[in-house]
Amino acid sequence: MVSKESRTENRVKKHMKIRNRFSGTAERPRLAVFRSNNHMYAQIIDDTVGNTLVSASTLQKDVKAELEKTNNVEAAAYLGTVIAKKALEKGIKTVVFDRGGFIYEGKIKALADAAREAGLEF
């Protein structure tokens, strides 16, 4: 009998392949995105030290207050603008985009496009 791998396992494998290709540095940190069924999370990480420089998610009160739902494309786009504004306040202009093994469409694409429009370069 053929056993089918779970989608989560496949996503984690894809993420590991992506992470082996690049990592965030102090000059160009990594914008890591995670999407669950209910929320989205974005972090800007310096992998050389292992520090999270900036983070934002749809769980935060100020972000959640602006949203009707926390798991749709509009919420992802708003989260992209929030993370970009926080990054620019800290002086971070360029990042490496880590889609976390997710397919680059829908919510992930909306977050990336909104972050680009708000001023982040990647």
Image (cartoon, helix red, strand yellow):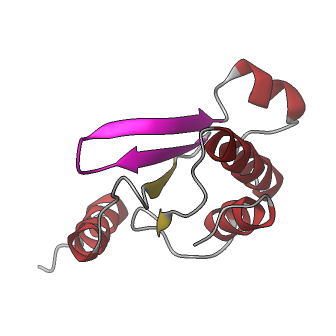
Q: Tell whether position 118 is magenta.
A: no
Q: Is residue 29 above or below residue 7?
A: above
Overall secondary structure of the magenta stretch? strand
Q: Is residue 23 left or right of residue 99?
A: left
Q: Is 97 or 60 nearer to us in this picture?
A: 97
In this view, which residue lies farthest toward the top? 61
Q: Is residue 67 left or right of residue 52?
A: right
Which residue is located at x 33 percent, y 37 percent?
51
- In the rendered image, residue 9, in percent from the top left (x then y), is placed at 26, 62
- In the rendered image, residue 80, in percent from the top left (x then y), is placed at 70, 53
Splitting the image into 4 quarters, where does residue 20 fall? bottom left
Which residue is located at x 17 percent, y 73 percent?
3
Q: Is 36 or 110 nearer to us in this picture?
A: 110
Splitting the image into 4 quarters, where does residue 11 fall? bottom left
Q: Is residue 10 above or below residue 119?
A: below
Q: Is 119 or 21 nearer to us in this picture?
A: 119
Which residue is located at x 45 percent, y 54 percent?
32
Q: Is residue 42 left or right of residue 27?
A: right
Q: Is residue 115 left or right of residue 25?
A: right
- In the rendered image, residue 43, in percent from the top left (x then y), is placed at 49, 44
| Image quarter (top left, top right, bottom left or bottom right) of the C terminus | bottom right
Which residue is located at x 29 percent, y 71 percent?
22
Q: Is 7 or 113 nearer to us in this picture?
A: 113
Marks counted in the figure total: 0
In this view, which residue lies farthest toward the left? 1
| Image quarter (top left, top right, bottom left or bottom right) of the N terminus | bottom left
- In the rendered image, residue 78, in percent from the top left (x then y), is placed at 79, 48
Q: Which residues are magenta?
A: 40-57
Q: Tell whether position 41 is magenta.
A: yes
